[in-house]
Amino acid sequence: MNPADLPPELAAQPVDLIDAVRAIAQGPLAARAQAIDEGAYPIDLIQQLAKMGAMSAHIDQPGQPGNYVTAILAMAEVGKVCGASSFLMWQQAVSALYLFGSENPAMNGERLQRHLAGEIIGATGMSNPMKGFAGIEKILLKGTPVEGGYLINGTLPWVSNLAPEHSLGTVATVEGAPEIMFMLPCNAPGVTLKHCPKFSGMEGTATFAVQCKDVFIGASEMLANPCLPYLKRIRGAFLLLQCGIAAGIIQGAIDSMWKVEDQLGHVNQFLDDRPDQLQAELDDLVGTVVKLCETPYDPSDAFYLDVVNARLAGGELSLRAANAALMHQGARGYLMCSDVQRRVREAQFVAIVTPAIKHLRKQAADLCAETLPA
Ligand SMILES: Cc1cc2nc3c(=O)[nH]c(=O)nc-3n(C[C@H](O)[C@H](O)[C@H](O)COP(=O)(O)OP(=O)(O)OC[C@H]3O[C@@H](n4cnc5c(N)ncnc54)[C@H](O)[C@@H]3O)c2cc1C
């Protein structure tokens, strides 16, 4: 995003980091966006962005409170160019949140600092547990207590940003006891990463099925036991960070509509969802997200309902904006090499990645039912 096309709330954010992120996004990342869509995993660029602090601005540091807006803006800068890379940034940012939010000193000390510096890469396998807690499907990983920890068994069908030396945050049920949340090292004995079938997009996200056979998880990998109170503290922040991916995809779509305005505006004016209308909706949404970022760890249901609605609006607007961009660009946007058609598939991902639009609507309905008097 150029400062000129930033929504006003974001234009007020510190620019040094964002300038540096933009330089990578518009330079080396833009040159590789199509290859990433087709399966090239840009871990070198993700590490470079992490080292610059692009996925750590939201984490409190001594003397410097975390800034969620900066973290979201950094993801948006990248998402405007490549949705898959923005999703990978979110993986690293949200796994930093897992370490930061943990009360286990093995997580939130040196390990967190190494993660923030990009020396350690993290991922998140929370789709299944989140759907489990929402009553949509069963939690797939089971933990059995043993001396000093748990043995984990089961398979997560798809987790991104994975390599043998990476770890992912996830949850297991324990019979007769509350669920536990832990970091699962991909190179732990008993873990197998299995290739997924080919996706229609996001192929460069290093997404694997994670099979666990008697994987030992000890105290040093435990994020929270029991995990529900911990998850309640970080659930809003988890969703707010995802809004960065959506904001980037929406802004990228709007920008691509303006690119053809001189040539096609005389006929594009008859289309729904014109770029100025979409920009106004994005600016409104960003304003809401910026406000919510003031209290990212508010555990109340009322706050979470507002976050769920903002994330839902981001998913819905991503679909509309990406589709509208294709309508505006016409055949040139339908070329296989066009970022416009790629963005349609990236927007579809924002709409189906957990929490998917249907999951968010269920969650909003459940939260409303809980807060309304019977
Ligand atoms: C490219 C990609 C990357 C992803 N990365 C992550 C990640 O990093 N971490 C993470 O936790 N989740 C990840 N997911 C999962 C994602 O967040 C969603 O959970 C998933 O897209 C399905 O969500 P849904 O709510 O639409 O569920 P639905 O698709 O409506 O329902 C899901 C249920 O159907 C089953 N199912 C769906 N498709 C198949 C199939 N082909 N074969 C067998 N069973 C099937 C699932 O196991 C599950 O029980 C990723 C998905 C994709 C496509």
Image: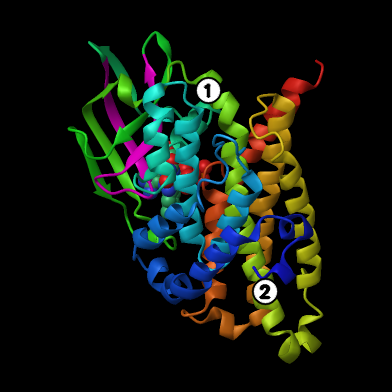
Task: Find the magenta span and give its range.
Answer: 149-174
Q: Does 270 appear above or below 76?
A: below
Q: Secondary structure at mark 1?
A: helix
Please state which of residues 282 and 329 is positioned toward the viewer in this rendering. 282
- From mark 1 to mark 2, how far is it between C-alphas? 39 Å
Q: Could you say which quadrant of the image residue 140 lies in?
A: top left
Measuring from the top left, give residue 182's x and y in whole percent: 38, 27
Q: Could you say which quadrant of the image residue 10 lies in?
A: bottom right
**Mark 1 = which residue?**
230
**Mark 2 = which residue?**
255
Q: Does 180 appear above or below 205?
A: above
Measuring from the top left, give residue 301's x and y in whole percent: 70, 25
Q: Residues within 10 Å of mark 2 (few under 14, many from 20)?
A: some
Residue for point 51% across, 47% down: 353
Q: Residues within 10 Å of mark 1 (few under 14, many from 20)?
A: some
Query: Is 329 part of what is drawn in magenta?
Result: no
What's the amino acid at mark 1?
Tyr
Residue 327 visible? The answer is: no
In the picture, the quarter occupied by the N terminus is bottom right
Q: Does 97 appear above or below 325?
A: above
Q: Secondary structure at mark 2?
A: helix
Measuring from the top left, give residue 276's x and y in whole percent: 80, 70
What's the amino acid at mark 2?
Asp
Please state which of residues 75 and 327 is positioned toward the viewer in this rendering. 75
Residue for point 47% across, 56% down: 52
